[in-house]
Image: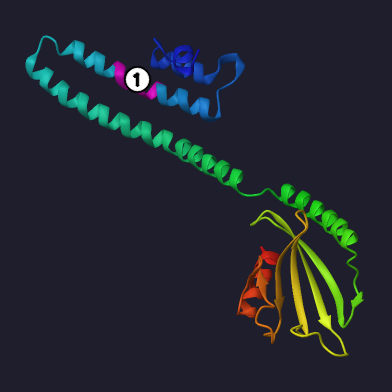
Amino acid sequence: MGHYEERVKDRSAEQILQTAGGGSGGAWSGPDGDYLRVAADVRSTQELIDALRDASESNSVFSRRVVWLTFALVVVGGAQTLATAWPHLIKQQTNRQHEVAGASEPRPTDTWNHTVQCATRADQWAAAVGLVEGKRQGDVETLGRENHYSPQYERCYVRVSYVRKGGKAAPGVPPNYDELWDAFERKLLATCAFAQSEDSGFCRIEGENVSNCVACQGFISDRMRR
């Protein structure tokens, strides 16, 4: 049984207000209390209109006046009802908007859990491929790595930085460059030099060569920041 059938239907304004007062059980508060008080206001207006209609049945002039008075009462009663219910309606709408926003945005606890999982997966990936800070292969040394869970892209990224040291440089290898990996998929996403390489094909994003290595570095920075 709904609020109307249980607490309002076939009841007078006084009875509805008594229900809102709660009797020995205490007064209704919050949305239920607001609903009952608004219902009592509406029922009170209806009762007044009914009384005026009964009084006007034997007098045509008075009847016309009652019509206009009834119209005025309906307008005023509607305005009062809206004014009473408006804060509650606004609060409900705001709560719904917050619920929708909360469903679409990652919660702090979720982001933290993903960050922990990302760090664990990055360690596992580094161990599997033998990635060690300071390790040198030819003239290229691994400077280090950094992992980051991105709530924006919902992926776990690892940036690995390299530097070329001494000796005869391998053709096309720049002095410094970064790689961006997806730790869960163990997939190389980008290779980007800090300076334009002699080999225009060195800077790559998702397997595609890019001529602008600055934009390539921007791609990595964006994934590691968001």
| Magenta residue check for 8 | no
Q: Nearer the viewer, residue 58 or 164?
A: 164
Q: Which colour scheme is used?
A: rainbow
Residue 190, relative to residue 21: is it above or below? below
Residue at left 15%, top 13%? Answer: 56
* Residue 37 position in % (x across, y down): 44, 25
Q: Which residue is drawn at 41% across and 34% down?
A: 84
The quadrant in which residue 132 appears is bottom right
Which residue corresponds to the image point at 81% horizontal and 51% vertical from the top-left? 117
The residue range painted magenta reads 40-47
Where residue 25 sits in the image (x, y, percent)?
Answer: 61, 16
- Please state which of residues 55 and 166 is positioned toward the viewer in this rendering: 166
Name the residue nearer the viewer: 92 or 54.
Answer: 92
- What kind of residue is marked 1? Ser
- Residue farthest toward the front in the current orientation of the protein: 171
Residue 46 lies within the magenta run: yes
Q: Would you say the magenta stretch is mainly helix, strand or loop?
A: helix
Would you say 114 lies left or right of 20 here?
Answer: right
Quadrant of the image occupied by residue 61: top left
Secondary structure beneath label 1: helix
Which quadrant of the rendered structure holds the C terminus?
Answer: bottom right
Q: Name the residue under label 1.
A: 44
Q: Where is residue 193 in the image (x, y as percent from the top left)?
A: 71, 79
